[in-house]
Image (cartoon, rainbow, N blue to C red):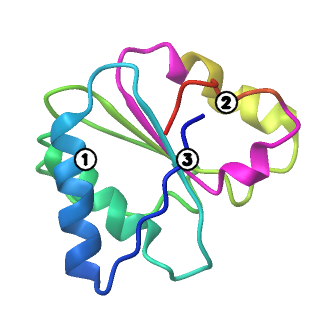
């Protein structure tokens, strides 16, 4: 997995960074990101989704675990914060999502560590 650190000074900057990245993404791309509660992960996701042509509102999937959006390619937005059991992950079909030909955004990927679920070729 390629690791990159970005620092943003505002929600607008986070959305713009996400938008620029989203414009470059192709089917099959995986983006994972971490940060404290309230750090702006969903704000960044909103920008990525805009860059991918999503016009509907992008909200945090904290309680639903997974949101799917239509853009120029499908966008799968996963919040792994509440996932603790590998069976829960199988139930939402995370492994199938990675193969669905869309872009997958995963917040809190550290919650999936040790479960051997995340592909190695993400950002």
Q: Which range is magenta?
A: 97-115
Tell us which disc is closer to us: 1 or 2: 1
Give residue 104's position: percent from left, percent from top.
Answer: 44, 35
Q: Quadrant of residue 16?
A: bottom left
- Pick whichever of labels 3 and 2 is earlier in the sequence: 3
The secondary structure type at the circle numbered 2 is loop
Residue at left 26%, top 24%? 26
Res. 118 mark:
2
- In 3D space, how far apart are the residues under numbered discs 1 and 3 (Cα atoms)? 14 Å
Q: Mark on residue 101?
A: none
Q: For the image shown, how many numbered marks are present on the structure?
A: 3
Of the residues tagged 1 and 3, which is closer to the observer? 3
Queried whether the magenta region covers residue 21, the answer comes back as: no
Position of residue 59 measured from the top left corner of the image (x, y, whole percent): 36, 63
Residue shown at the point (28%, 81%) measured from the top left: 11
Q: Quadrant of residue 70?
A: top left
Precedes in sequence: disc 1 or disc 2: 1
Whether residue 58 is visible to the viewer of this picture, yes or no, is no
């Amino acid at each position: 997995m390629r690791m990159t650190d970005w620092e943003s000074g505002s929600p607008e900057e986070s959305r713009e960074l996400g938008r620029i990245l989203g414009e470059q993404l192709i089917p099959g791309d995986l983006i994972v990101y971490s940060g404290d509660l309230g750090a702006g992960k969903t704000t960044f996701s909103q920008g990525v989704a805009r860059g991918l042509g999503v016009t509907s509102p992008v909200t945090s999937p904290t309680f639903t675990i997974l949101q799917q959006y239509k853009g120029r390619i499908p966008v799968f937005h996963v919040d792994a914060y509440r996932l603790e059991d590998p069976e829960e992950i199988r139930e939402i079909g995370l492994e199938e999502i990675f193969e669905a030909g869309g872009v997958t955004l995963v917040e809190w990927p550290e919650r999936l560590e040790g479960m051997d679920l995340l592909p190695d070729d993400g950002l």
